[in-house]
Amino acid sequence: MRKFLQGSEAVAEAVKLCKVGVIAAYPITPQTPIPETLAKMVADGKLKAEFINVESEHSAASFVLGATATGVRSYTATSSQGLLYMGEVIFNIAGMRLPVILTCTNRAVSAPINIWNDQSDSMALRDSGSIQFYCENHQELVDLHIQAYRIAEDKNIMLPVMVSMDGYILTHGFEVVDVPSQEDVDKFLPPLNLKHKLDVENPLTLGFLADPEYYMETRYAIQKTHEGVLKFIPQVVREFEGVFGRRSGGLVECYRLEDAEKVIVACGSVCGTIKETIEEARRKKKKYGLLRIITYRPFPLQEIYKALKDKPQIAILEKAVSLGAYGPLYTEIKMLFSQKDNKKLKREKRICGFIAGLGGRDITKDTISYIFKRLSQKQVDCEFVDLKPEYIE
Amino acid sequence: MKEIRIHARAGQGAITAAVILGEAYFLEGKFTYAFPHFGAARMGAPMNAYVRCDTKPVILRSQIYEPDYLIIVDSTLIKDFYCLRGLKEDGIAIISEKEGIEIPKPKKRQKFYVVPANRIALETIARPLGNTVLLGAFSAVTEEIRLESLIEAVKKRLSGKAAEQNVRAVEKGYEFIKRG
């Protein structure tokens, strides 16, 4: 059913449709409307779940870890400092192979205090073992949360999924969404059935000591599973389309790439603004395109290579930077084209890195046009776009 | 695509106005994206809300710098917060009247409508919250949205007494313009 919903409400609707049994969350802007909406659903008897008020994000993550370990589908959401405070537990969740779903409402990281959007928070946890999705719009919010449970809980995967959504732009924006029926979601998502779970009748220990004899293999196993996730996601997308009648999610989206000569690579809601800019430029016969990264972990190496191999000029636009190095996505894409046999590449390539929109600085069509233009001038690895010179000494 | 920028102070219902307007567009079968922009959100701080609407999906995510329409809920903001900045050459502004606040002259093809929104709100809602009155006026001035759709949207977004009062506020705002 089509509804006009706030992004946070849309997420709560999706989580409800997934019939979660435990929700634990600690409020932090701009995540707050998600647990608020879910708490109301529980209080109104519309969602049969335990809503657990906790004293911190560390506890929220620990609760969903424990609940999932007992075989109950669980959910949490956070942002920024809250996500970093969860960080230790998220590594544990991945290490214990628990299919927890976590929404990260992307927000800048302090100090200085900044409550606005960028993607520094989720990018900082890219090495945790969790799968990571980045949503462009409200429909994808709904669809990717439902797919997240399906993927995480598959017996060959068993890993947490972090669904990232840009703070304010998606969390507080209202848009038309097709909310699926309970019947369809039930068809797509079977109840959680863990092979190994905490049970007083059959005692079991999870995440216990693995000394140098064993630890490395646990990490190798997660790495191998991520390779499997890359193959599994396209299958889930097809299954999803079969039930819901629309294609949604996946590894990457190629937008106007066929004949594109200049391509921006980006993830999240800014891709809408990039598409709008591309459409306007196309009317002036400019061959611009976009490669949107939907799944960032595991990193869809093959798909990115395939999409970009014939493209002469590529800009990586990121709302995060690995301070002291480059944008994380830039580093990985650059690596991809230096390790592949360069002789196979038909033309010489320019790959440039741009950082924009940190701490909520608005990314406009002008920002995007500037990046497309800048791309033909000279190689840059890590240019901060839209800086205000008056604030720089 | 049409772009609307709403100026208010936090607590004056700019977001509610944007959401009601978005919902009304949705009821008329349009695609719409309504979103707020806060400072560090606290009562009384200047803030904006935005609405984009189109016959195709709205994908542009930046703030609105060159609106077709302005709705100014608190006219004390006009001067210091540059509310009129970027309004299109033929743009329209719907402005809540306030004693002692001088409204600047519009450019040649622009039109400004000053509405005693807080007075009307005091009569209908018993609180000086002119946001929904201005929506009624917006409907009458621009004919972008039907009055019936706005009323239906108010009923969807608000309930009980608040819905009844705000429906009257919307109607009064509409009538104020139509009576000239």
Image: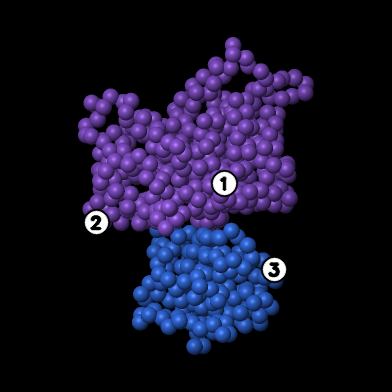
Chain colours: A purple, B blue
Left or right, A96 with respect to A148, comes to right
Residue B160: which disc?
Answer: 3
Q: Residues within 10 Å of mark 2 (few under 14, many from 20)?
A: few
The x, y position of residue B14, in whole percent, is: 56, 67
Farthest bottom residue in view: B180
Determine the chain carrying the residue at label 2: A
Residue A254 versus residue A8 in the image, above or below: above
Determine the chain carrying the residue at label 3: B
> Residue type at mark 3?
Gly
The x, y position of residue B125, in whole percent, is: 66, 76
Which comes before the other along the chain, label 1 or label 2?
1
Q: Residues within 10 Å of mark 1 (few under 14, many from 20)?
A: few
The residue identified by callout 2 is: A284
Specify whether residue A74 is in view. no
3 vs 1, front mark: 1
> Residue type at mark 2?
Lys
Q: Which residue is at 70% across, 37% downward?
A: A59
Left or right, A260 with respect to B112, comes to left
Element under label 3? helix
Q: Residue A150 sits in which quadrant?
A: top right
Specify whether residue B42 is in view. yes
Residue A110: which disc?
Answer: 1
Residues marked 3 and 1 touching at CB (< 8 Å): no
The x, y position of residue A142, in whole percent, is: 54, 46
Q: CA distance from mark 3 to mark 1?
A: 42 Å
1 vs 2, front mark: 1
Determine the chain carrying the residue at label 1: A
